């Protein structure tokens, strides 16, 4: 390890070494909750850092949100899961994303239409939300869904 420059042996002292590159704690910040149901106020406060390497989900500016609700259950996203997302302002047709309208956010599949977009629930018991073109300026994409963490288990999309 000394040859690689990771540690320095302290001269004159037996078994005394110094780490040259302190281990950085890496993980994915858990920012709060997001409803997977009707739009509800988003909570954005860092609760903790999940001890999961961002590289597992492809790296980049990642964050996690605790899912609340059952609107995405038909794609395997359940109440209490931790959704891992890549922070980005755009989403492609058909991708699942955190979408914010004014101060409310939700986790839904985003479908573009000729008149605007549809925030599609993946549970037939939950209605979709249609956003017409003149309201689209109020829509902000917070991040694109990459996978989830469920009770100690990782699952990529």
Image (cartoon, rainbow, N blue to C red):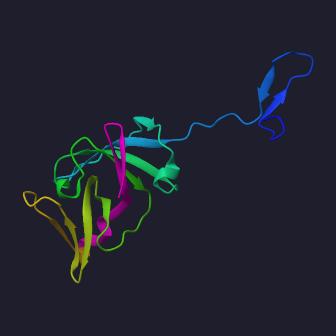
Between 129 and 82, the residue placed more toward the observer is 82
- Does the segment drawn in magenta span residue 130? no
Give x and y (percent) for residue 105. 27, 54
How many discs appear? 0
- Between 27 and 154, the one lying in front of the other is 154
Q: Quadrant of residue 101?
A: bottom left
Res. 11 image quadrant: top right
For the C terminus, which image quadrant? bottom left
Specify whether residue 153 is painted magenta.
Answer: yes
| Image quadrant occupied by the N terminus | top right
Q: Which residues are magenta?
A: 135-157
Residue 64's place in the image compared with 75, above or below, is above
The quarter holding residue 139 reads: bottom left
Position of residue 21 measured from the top left corner of the image (x, y, whole percent): 73, 36
Residue beneath the point at 52% across and 55% down? 59
In the rendered structure, the answer to whether residue 141 lies left or right of residue 108 reads right
Q: Main secondary structure of the magenta part?
A: strand
**At 26% from the left edge and 56% from the top edge, which residue is drawn?**
107
Q: In this image, 4 relative to 53: left or right?
A: right
Q: Is residue 112 left or right of residue 147?
A: left
Residue shown at the point (28%, 57%) measured from the top left: 102
Q: Residue 35 at what x, y percent from top left?
A: 23, 49
């Amino acid at each position: 390890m000394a040859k690689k420059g990771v540690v320095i042996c302290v001269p004159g002292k037996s078994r005394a070494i110094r780490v040259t590159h302190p281990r950085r704690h890496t993980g994915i910040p858990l920012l709060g909750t997001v409803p997977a149901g009707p739009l509800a106020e988003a909570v954005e406060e860092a609760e903790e850092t999940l001890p999961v390497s961002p590289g597992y989900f492809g790296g980049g500016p990642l964050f996690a949100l605790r899912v609340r609700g059952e609107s995405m259950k038909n794609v395997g996203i359940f109440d209490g899961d931790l959704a891992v997302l890549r922070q980005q302002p755009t989403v492609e047709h058909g991708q699942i994303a955190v979408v914010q309208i004014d101060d409310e956010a939700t986790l839904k599949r985003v479908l573009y239409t000729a008149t605007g977009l549809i925030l599609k629930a993946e549970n037939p018991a939950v209605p979709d939300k249609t956003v017409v073109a003149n309201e689209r300026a109020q829509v902000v994409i917070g991040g694109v869904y990459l996978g989830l963490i469920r009770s100690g288990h990782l699952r990529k999309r």
